[in-house]
Amino acid sequence: MSRSREILVLVLLWSIVTACNLTKAFHIDDTAHLSIAEAIKASPLHAMDAEFNWLETATPIHTMNQPHLFFYLLAGFMSWFGESEVILHSLLALFSALAIVVFWQIASKITSRPFLLTALFCISPAFIPSQNIMVDVPLLSIWLIFFNQLLSDPETSPRSHVFAALALAGALLMKYTSLVLLPILILDIAMKRRWREMWVVLLPILALAAWSAFNYWSYGGIHLVERHASGYSVGRMLIRTAAWVICLGSMLPWLFVTSLQPLSRRRRRFAAIGLGLGAGLATLAGSFLFDEPLNRSILRAIFATAGLSFLTHLATRAFGMLRASPSPVNRHSILLFSWIAATSVFIVLFSPAVAVRHILLVTPAVLLLVAPALEVLNKTLLHLLVGMHFILAGAAGASDYVYAETYRRSAAKLIAEFGTEGVTWFTGHWGWMWYAQQAGLRQYDLVYSKPRAGDILVAPENIDKQPLTESHKLRLRLVDQVEAPSTPSTFFRVGHPAGYYASSIRRLPWEFCSEPTETFLIYQFE
């Protein structure tokens, strides 16, 4: 393919994913990130001291999880161009373009069908809805730059480890999850036996040290060491591991096909029977353990089967590779295996929740590892899998777009209908919080708010929200409830509630649902 055609295809892919997101409402953690950016605009050197209510009451920003490199960039963009949805999603579109181009460069080194793999990467249910004003796609683009350098030919890229270390430094200042890349950098230096370049490991360490020193000067603490990990127990880790497997299978449910492809016909038949029986048992277990619709139990079984079959296949390949002699191909595979394994362990152990945005970080490695199986698939079956993948991506993108739009449209409408001469309060965070404040509603604070008789409270049911004091609860009288009805695009549901952004065994990343998208409860204080 000529260079001009390659560029044309990449621009087309970028145009598709950008069109799905450009006018989308601010959503989920966008509100927190926009608020941090506004604090940086107001006080660039002491933004960590600004207070923000993201749980129950106003707390300093330094209690939140993310470092601030992306937020400083966001603050600068807001200062120069404004803060409308289109403007800020245009910033995200630049990172989407970077991710697409760099992934294509990596795929070109590993597979003979880089454009197919790139299309599966970006027109996917993990990528399209994740283009919020959050760190996920920007972080992914930096990770891809890191791995692109490691997967380069040492002879043609003599400074690849320097550039990889600089990319890692930037990634660490976007999200601490990037710590998993540090041992991978050391591993690659060791595999290439370029011991004199081990000094580059100091670059990301120095970046974290500089950030920590800035934290201490700015607010008197070190942000990195203040992160609180979730409680540990064997049961909890098993549940989170299961949620990770389900989440992976929900984004790439066709993985079981590629996992069976390398097997002989006889073994493939037995494996297919085993997967079918396992899925059936998982469906029965879900129906027995959880009070839920049958379709949810079936979907959970499909997701778990797809994710588990791929991870089993991955483990088998890894053990086989350990017995083989080292080679350049094996070095690539080791890096891809390490990418998936290190990220998976970190998310299960340390992340507040398992979510699709975490699966997004390993999706490139998964696609690169299944590329050989895709290349030898029957054309009819390949077209069927690719078509199903694109349909799933379109459904997820449309569903999440409408989910976000529900809160943008509802805020002004509700205050116009139920606003009084007193104060109209609201509970709830995420994108709803941004639009409620824009419409003039006042955020309820568990500690500081003192509603008076006659004030109105608007409380969405299906989002994360702060509790009320017992005395305030006793004064509430339900006035009305307003439903945001389900639509054809939300029958495929990524938000019931927000399973796409915080998954568990019971809360799936997506499902089929005809219930209202949201129900707003309208109360009056007496």
Image: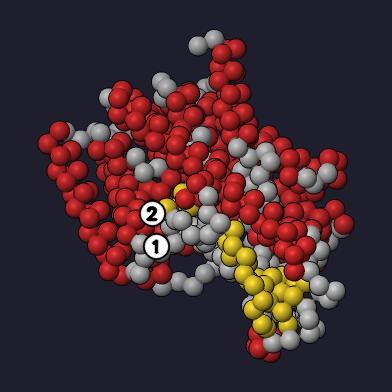
Which one is nearer the viewer's eye here, 222 or 458? Answer: 458
Query: Which residue lies at the image location 68% right of the left edge and 67% below the top edge?
Result: 54
Report crowding for label 2: few under 14, some 14 to 19, many 20 or more residues within 10 A (C-alpha).
many
Q: Which mark is residue 505?
A: 1
Can the viewer see residue 323? no
Which one is nearer the viewer's eye here, 128 or 4? Answer: 128
Amino acid of disc 2: Ile
Query: Which residue lies at the image location 50% right of the left edge and 38% below the top edge?
Result: 394
Query: Which residue lies at the image location 55% right of the left edge and 43% below the top edge?
Result: 398
Height in image: 480 above or below 318? Answer: below
Label 2 residue SS? helix
Where residue 365 appears, as percent x and y from the top left, is: 44, 39
Q: Which mark is residue 380?
A: none
Where residue 167 appears, as percent x and y from the top left, is: 63, 40
Side of 360 relative to 388 (left or right): right
Farthest residue to the top: give it.
Answer: 2
